[in-house]
Image: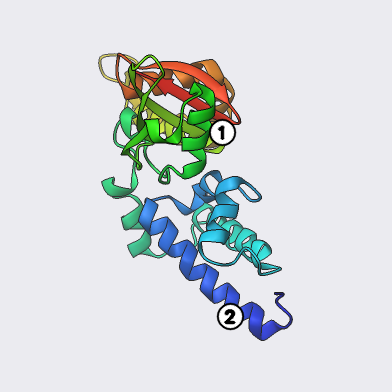
Amino acid sequence: MSITNREEANQYYKLVNKLVDEYIDGHKIRPSKLSAYLKPGGQRFNKFLERNKLKDITGADRILRDIIEDREHMEKDGVITFESFNLLESSEWKVSNLRECIYKGIEKADLKMEKILADYFDINLGAIDILDSDKHKFSIEDWKNDDWKVVIYSEEEIEVIKNNLVEYMYSDISKKEIELTEEVSIKLNNLIDMEKFEVKLLDLLNEDKMNKIICQCLGEDWSFEASSKGHFIYVC
């Protein structure tokens, strides 16, 4: 099915606008970070279209791209209401600690992840139990009857976590204050440019560092196991 005229296009723009607003509110995502969570053309972007029965509508992907771009520009350009600004600045919309970085904006685990785990560990799907689908945590029993706890993320979700880390670290460092002399001190938020900080930190957060940080967030007994079929596996 295709969008064939302006009236239909307007109807779909209205529908997708509503769906994007619900997504933003449900995941507590800043509009300026929307493309980090719904990367145009990516797996989560396509899943959004599929989940909302828009995948087979020719032109719906373009509408979603336009709305994501529009939302990002609205916040970056300051075109938001005072009420919306207060909401975005509330603690509910911020990553308040390091551990939250591996959960914010992460959707529920799906059957594909279970199949990847089954293939990697060479076990049947029946040997895999979901402990927490929101946190992508599974329990598996291998052929030696050893029990493992496992967490799995897709490459796109690793990018989401990386962006969460940038947001959290910038917020954390912005609160710090440097004492230049006994009489003179200055807050770092007056010195650090957010965009430059983000570019530098994204460059520093390579695969090895990301795996170590994720294990730190999961707990001291967790370790990185392997990457398989575009997914990263952690075990305990």
Where disc 2 sits, the SS reads helix
Question: Which amino acid, mark 2?
Answer: Gln
The residue that disc 2 covers is 11
Question: In x, y percent, where is residue 59?
Answer: 70, 68
Q: Residue at x 55, y 67 (%)?
A: 53
Q: Residue 155 carries which label?
A: 1
Q: Residue at x 61, y 30 (%)?
A: 229
The image quadrant of residue 155 is top right
In the depicted view, which residue is nearer to us: 93 or 89? 93
The image quadrant of residue 98 is top left
**Residue 232 seen from this side:** yes
**Residue 163 seen from this side:** no
Name the quadrant of the C terminus. Answer: top left
Lower sequence index among marks 1 and 2: 2
In the depicted view, which residue is nearer to us: 1 or 84? 1
Image-based side of 163 in relation to 183, left or right: right
Name the quadrant of the N terminus. Answer: bottom right
Q: Which colour scheme is used?
A: rainbow
Q: Is residue 8 above or below residue 195?
A: below
Image-based side of 107 in relation to 13, left or right: left
Badge 1 density bin: few <14, some 14–19, many ≥20, Cα 10 Å? some
Question: In x, y percent, where is residue 157?
Answer: 50, 37
Badge 2 density bin: few <14, some 14–19, many ≥20, Cα 10 Å? few
